Image (cartoon, rainbow, N blue to C red):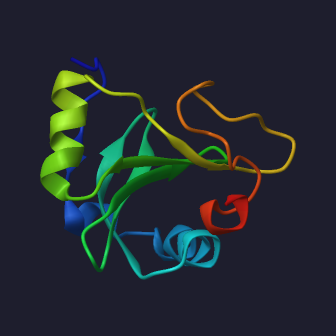
Amino acid sequence: MNDEPYSFDPFGAGLGQRALATELESVLGGRYFPIGEWLSHSGVFVESRGRVVAAGMGWIWELGSSVEESFELAVTADRPLPCLYSDPGLGPWPTGAGAEGAGQSEERAR
C-alpha cells in the first residue's frame, strides 16, 4: 500500500485547479476535471473518457484508465507508476516506470 492518502473530493479539488487542468489538456489532449489529491498533494484529474492522471511539481503520472484502476493502484501499488511528462529540466520520476516521453507529451514521444 502507498503511504500517502488518496483524497477523493471533486468539490474541494476543483478549487483553484482549472489552470492545471488546462495545462493537462494542452500536454495530453482531452478534457480533464479535478477529482482529488494524491502523491505529495498532486492534483488528481479524470479525463472525460475515464483516464485518471496526477499532476504536480512539474510531472504528470498515469494512475489508470478508470477511477477504479487509480484507486487500485493507490491501495495495492502493484504496478509501476508511469511518468507521462516532466517539465523541461526535470527528469522523469520515478525513473524506469514508463517515462520514455518525459519532457514532451506522450503523443509526441511516440
Q: Quadrant of the N terminus?
A: top left
Horizontal side of 8 relative to 25 (left or right) equals left
Q: Nearer the viewer, residue 37 or 60?
A: 60
- The residue positioned 12% from the left and 51% from the top of the image is 68
- Percent across and percent down for residue 99 are 62, 39
Asked whether 92 or 56 is in front, the reply is 92
Q: Residue at x 23, y 46 (%)?
A: 70
Residue furthest to the front: 110
Residue 54: give x, y in percent of width and height.
43, 50
Q: Picture coordinates of residue 52 (x, y %)? A: 32, 58
Task: Give 28 or 100, whichever is nearer the viewer.
Answer: 100
Q: How many marks?
A: 0
Left or right of 91, for residue 26: left
Classify 53 as above or below 38. Answer: below
**Quadrant housing the C terminus:** bottom right
| Residue 107 vertical position relative to residue 64 in the rendered view, above or below | below
Q: Residue 2, located in which quarter of the rendered image?
A: top left
Q: Residue at x 68, y 50 (%)?
A: 101
Residue 48 quadrant: bottom left
Which residue in the rendered view is the most extreme toward the right? 89
Quadrant in the rendering for residue 66 = bottom left
Q: Residue 89: where, in percent of width, then height?
A: 87, 42
Question: Residue at the spot x=46%, y=68% of the render?
Answer: 17
* Residue 50 to residue 42: above or below: below
